[in-house]
Image (cartoon, rainbow, N blue to C red):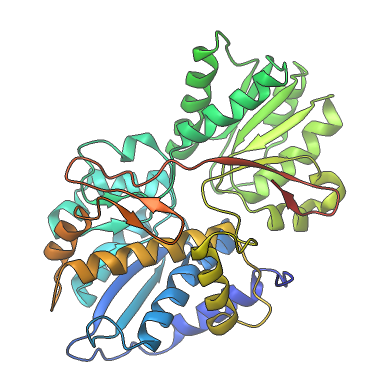
Amino acid sequence: MFQPRGNRSIVLFLMCLLALPGAIAAKNDIVIGQVAPLTGVIASTGAEMVLGARIYFDSVNAEGGIDGAKIRHEVRDDAYTVTETVRQTLDLIAHDKPVALIGFAGTGNIGELQKQKVLDNAGIALVGPYTGAPGLRGPDNHNIFHIRASYWDEADTMVDQLVTLKMDRIAIMYQNDPFGESGRDGVIAALKKRGLTPAMMATYEKGTAEISDAAKKIGAVNPQAVIMISVNRPTANFSKEIRALCSVNQLFNISVVNATEIVKLIGADKARGIGIAQVMPNPNSIAVPVVKEYQAAIRKYAPAGTAYSYTSLEEFIAAKVLVEGIRHAGANPTAARVLAAMSTLTAYNAGGFPLSFSDTNRVGGRFVELTIINRYGQLIH
C-alpha cells in the first residue's frame, strides 16, 4: 500500500497539466470531457476524481487506445461553483466536442445542468457523477449513468446500524444546499421507516467550514449519534467541536468524505471512531480484480507516493465503464451513439464490481458498506 503524501502533489500535478497549451487533437482522437473542482473547498476531492479517470485512460492509450484511436481527456476546473460548472460544461462541449462526459461533482451543480437542459441539448452522456442524490436518478435524467449507490441507500445503512446498536436519538448535520438536503431527506426517511424522528437538525453554508452554530444547536440536545451530510473540512471541524460539547457516541458521514483528509485536518486521535459509508470496494484490498487493476495503474501513471483512495477508485471504475460503452458504440463514436450504447450494458462486470444499465435504468449499482477510522487514522471495515 502506498503511504499518503497528501493530495497537494496530485493537485499540483493536475493543475500543471491544465496550464499546458491545449493539445491539438489527432483526427481520430476520442475526446472525453470532465469538469471538476480542482480549486476551492473540495479541491482535493476533485483532484482524486480527475486522477482516477486519467490513469485508466492512460492505461487504455498505452495499449493502443480504442480501435486505434487515442483518448484525449479534457478537464476544466469549476471550483465547486454552480455557475462555473454550467459555463465550463457549455464551453467544453462547444470547443472540444467530447463523445461523453465523466465524473462531475455536486448535486446542485449537476442539478443546474439538468435544469438548463445542457446534457439534453447536447445529446451527451455523463458517466459516474460524484453524487448520490435521488433527484438526479429519475426517468427525466436519462443522460446520467450512476455507478454509486444513492445517498438514501447510504442513509438507510447508517441508520440501520445505529438502531441495531440501540441508538434512537439521532441528529443530522448537513450542508445547506441540494446535496445536503438530499442526504438529510434520506436520513429522515430511514428514521421514519423505523418509527423515529431526528433528535435535532442543523446546517452550515456551502463553501464554508463554519459549523460552530450547528455544533452548538446539536450539542444542546446531547444526541447518541449524529449523521453528517458534509464535505471534508466541515466534517472535521464539526466532529472535533461536537465531541467537546456533548457525549455523542457515534458520528457517521456519507461517502463523499475522505478519511485521510479528515485525519490530516484534526489528527487521528480526534478523528478516531468516525464512521464513513462507502459505495466502492476497499481500494487497499486486492481481493477485487478491478481494485488490483486500479492499484497497478496508480503505480504506473500517478505521481510517486500517491495514496489509494475510494474517490480515485470510483472514477477509475467510471472510466472503465465509459470506455466499455464507447467500444459498444462502434467505430468513429459520436456522443449520440455513446449515449445509446451505455444503455446496452445490462450485465457489465467491471472486475468484481457488477453494474447494470438499460433504457429504463440509469443506476448501475447499490453497493454500500460501513467503515470506521481507527486510532491510527486508518479505515477499518
Which quadrant of the rendered structure holds the N terminus? bottom right
Q: Residue furthest top?
A: 195
In the image, taking residue 295 as reference, residue 212 lies left or right, namely right
Tell me: residue 13, above or below residue 140: below
- What's the residue at 59%, 23% (across, down)? 160
Tell me: residue 67, above or below residue 315: below
In the image, taking residue 247 as reference, residue 262 lies left or right, namely left
In the image, taking residue 102 as reference, residue 286 lies left or right, namely right
Can residue 68 be seen? Answer: yes
Q: Nearer the viewer, residue 302 or 15?
A: 302
- Residue 82 position, x and y percent, is 38, 51
Locate residue 178: give its quadrant: top left
Tell me: residue 260, above or below residue 210: below
Q: Nearer the viewer, residue 369 or 84?
A: 369
- What's the residue at 39%, 57% (across, down)? 104
Tell me how many marks there are. Answer: 0
- Residue 323 position, x and y percent, is 30, 69
- What's the residue at 35%, 77% (across, down)? 73
Can residue 46 be seen? Answer: no
Tell me: residue 251, above or below residue 353: above
- Residue 274 position, x and y percent, is 74, 40
- Residue 176 position, x and y percent, is 51, 35
In the image, taking residue 202 as reference, residue 216 lies left or right, namely right
